[in-house]
Image (cartoon, rainbow, N blue to C red):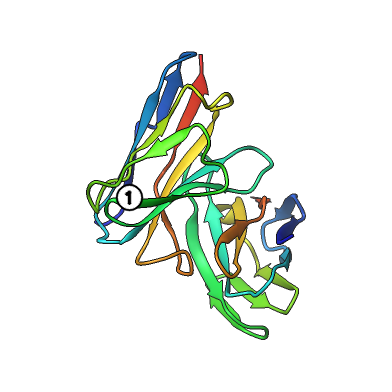
């Protein structure tokens, strides 16, 4: 079955550490996204990519980095510069752009030790 | 500033008790309104897209409607398996803006 796979399901970060969240899709979608979800807030866009080797910052990109070396993969690195990283991270994809329905992965819960 | 507001924050219904969830928006140039369902600890799942005022879409016990200022998600005779958080998102000229969601609990 086609879909989006996020791993790990749970991740713990020590102070000063960078951690990487994995996102893989086999839907053959061009566009991929990373969102952050905090209790009581709407989903906020971190980064998005509409084509391989190209990506744009979203509303809250500071302290995060991404790469898009393959169409299927869009990993997110949470750097030590992100001072409040505890949140539920969601990866999504769409055929070409944000004006279409999004397909979401099952999320990664990141917590700080 | 473009904004999406969902109400109520939480809703408890008895099985079979119909109700509506609201999504009001102020955006510069609506290009689409989306409804998603999210179960605890999971990613959102797409339900509907609405593009213009007067449009309606249905799926099982759910019916979404759209006016120039708001959208309603009507739930008819809900069942406990309809319990979830329902998210509304609005696409303006260049991005998607999500509301904070309505947490629905349906008890037997």
In the current view of this chain or complex, which residue is farthest to the bottom?
Answer: B54
Residue A17 position (above or below residue A63) = above
Q: Nearer the viewer, residue B36 or B83?
A: B36
| Residue A32 in which image quadrant | bottom left
Q: Residue B105, percent across and down? A: 66, 49
Residue occupying image coordinates x 36% and y 30%: A20
- Mark 1, Cα crowd under 10 Å, few <14 / some 14-19 / many 20+, is many
Q: Quadrant of the N terminus of chain B?
A: bottom right
From the viewer's side, name the closer residue of B35 and A48.
Answer: A48
* Chain letter, disc 1 residue: A
Q: Is residue B28 left or right of residue B58?
A: right
User: With B16 as the anchor, is A53 left or right in this view?
Assistant: left
| Residue with the mark numbered 1 | A4
Whether residue A33 is visible, yes or no, is no
Can residue A77 be seen from the camera position used here?
Answer: yes
Residue B56 pos. (x, y %): 61, 81
Residue at image location 51% in from the left, 66% down from the top: B47
User: Could you say where residue A73 lies in the image, as x and y percent from the top left?
Assistant: 27, 46
* B10 left or right, relative to A5: right
Number of labels in the image equals 1
Residue A96 sits in quarter = bottom left
Q: Residue at x 61, y 58 (%)?
A: B97
Question: Picture coordinates of residue B6 (x, y %)?
Answer: 72, 57
Up the image or down, B72 lies above or below B105; here it is below
Above or below for A12 versus A78: above
Q: Write the residue at 30% across / 54% down.
A: A3
Residue at disc 1, secondary structure:
strand
Q: Nearer the viewer, residue B6 or A84?
A: A84
């Amino acid at each position: 079955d086609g879909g989006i796979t996020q791993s790990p399901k749970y991740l713990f970060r020590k102070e000063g550490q960078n951690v990487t969240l994995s996102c893989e899709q086999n839907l053959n979608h061009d566009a991929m996204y990373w969102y952050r979800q905090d209790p009581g807030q709407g989903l906020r866009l971190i980064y998005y990519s509409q084509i391989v080797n190209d990506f744009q910052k979203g509303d809250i990109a500071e302290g995060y980095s991404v790469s898009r070396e393959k169409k299927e993969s869009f990993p997110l690195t949470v750097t030590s510069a992100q001072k409040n990283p505890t949140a539920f991270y969601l990866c999504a994809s769409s055929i070409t752009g944000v004006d279409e329905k999004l397909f979401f992965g099952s999320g990664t819960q990141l917590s700080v030790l | 500033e473009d904004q999406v507001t969902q109400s109520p924050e939480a809703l408890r219904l008895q099985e079979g008790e119909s109700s509506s969830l609201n999504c009001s928006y102020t955006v510069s140039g609506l290009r689409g309104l989306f409804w998603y369902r999210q179960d605890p600890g999971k990613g959102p799942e797409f339900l509907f897209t609405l593009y213009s005022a007067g449009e309606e879409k249905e799926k099982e016990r759910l019916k979404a409607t759209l006016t120039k200022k708001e959208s309603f998600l009507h739930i008819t005779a809900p069942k406990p398996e309809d319990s979830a958080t329902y998210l509304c998102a609005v696409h303006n000229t260049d991005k998607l803006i999500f509301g904070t969601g309505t947490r629905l609990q349906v008890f037997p």
